[in-house]
Amino acid sequence: MSADPYNITLQAEERFARTGLDSLSLAEESMHRQRSRDLAVNLGDGSSKYFYRLLRARHAHSFISQITDAEGNTFSEPQGIAAVVVSYFSNLLGPTVDMHQPDLSYISPSNYVSDEDAESLKLPVAVSEIEEVIKASNPNRAPGPDGFNAHFFKVFWPIIGNDVCEAITDFFKHGQMLNRLKASFIILVPKSEYAASPDKFRPISLTNELYKIISRILVHRLKPIIGKLLSPMQSSFIPGRSIADNILVAQDLIHNFHLSRGTPRMCVKIDLAKAYDSVVLEFHEAALRCLRFPVLGIHFPLRGESGKFGHGN
């Protein structure tokens, strides 16, 4: 270009090369941003050095160099670390047990899912419902085993939209899903800065985006129903309720605990996390059946690893 700056052909080639370079630079920046997991920075900021620093910091924070088991033995090789982690969480989540039919007679008929609500859960999914879920999805969440996050679905929706809608519609119609779509990564997130034992890590599951879309559709359909089924005492994770209400109630209850007069009283703190993790899925399924949830609403959340919902392995 310096030798012949008015050459139209060279100008066109330069514009084409610049366009390609900009596209590659944006793709590289997008990759660094996703790996850095900084969701507050927008694409186009060009902070590659900043992303690299975040990436190194995240890697140093999340990397498990060694771990100590319950007996105090320390392991630093990958095989030993994996064995300790698998053993701990297998015991925490509870072994497979033969469970007798639980007594659910305490569940009041007033808490049953009404026929109208049950039908709303089984309605065929509309394309607009799928598109609404995708538009509301965070585009930069970590992807599952397929490597695609919501950003990919949004950008390439004109190309893949029909196939995605067909797959989701088929699931709601037949209750079947390929095992590869239900695959997930299990990631250990440290609870503290110096996590050295398995109990200091929190496991999270990274699922495929198609699986997430189906889950969100069911969640959106459950929102207007769930408040009718749960006790008013359940104040968290329910739209329109706040966990702060329970904090105020607890404060009022223990306000006069220090006084010697009055009826003897006691306050018990329960480890809810481990209690919930130890509940077997068969009990959940029996409770959902007792509440008269439709089959799809029972088997999808509980039998994500089965080949066909309704015929769980």
Image: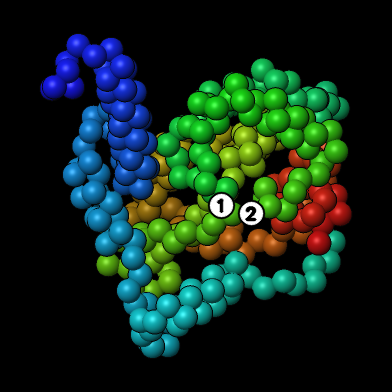
Q: Quadrant of residue 244?
A: top left
| Type of amino acid at the residue the image marks with label 1 | Pro
Q: Residue at left 29%, top 55%? A: 58
Q: Is residue 223 visible?
A: no
Q: Is residue 87 visible?
A: yes
Q: Which residue is mark 2?
A: 183
Task: Report whether 230 appears left or right of 253.
Answer: right
Label pair 1/2, CB-CB below 8 angstroms = yes
Task: Report whether 36 appears left or right of 146.
Answer: left
Q: Residue at left 32%, top 74%? A: 65
| Type of amino acid at the residue the image marks with label 2 | Ala
Q: Quadrant of residue 250?
A: top left
- Number of residues whose C-alpha sits closer than 10 Å to that of mark 2, classed few (under 14), some (14–19) or many (20 or more): some
Q: Secondary structure at mark 2?
A: loop
Q: Nearer the viewer, residue 13 or 231?
A: 13
- Number of residues whose C-alpha sits closer than 10 Å to that of mark 1, classed few (under 14), some (14–19) or many (20 or more): some
Q: Can you give x and y, in whole percent of width and height, for residue 131 in the image?
A: 61, 22
| Quadrant including the N terminus | top left
Q: Which mark is residue 107?
A: none
Q: Can you give x and y, in whole percent of width and height, for residue 160 in the image?
A: 63, 29
Q: Nearer the viewer, residue 107 or 189?
A: 189
Q: Residue at left 82%, top 51%? A: 308
Q: Can you give x and y, in whole percent of width and height, for residue 138 in the image?
A: 46, 32
Q: Nearer the viewer, residue 289 or 58?
A: 58
Q: Secondary structure at mark 1?
A: loop
Q: Which residue is mark 1?
A: 145
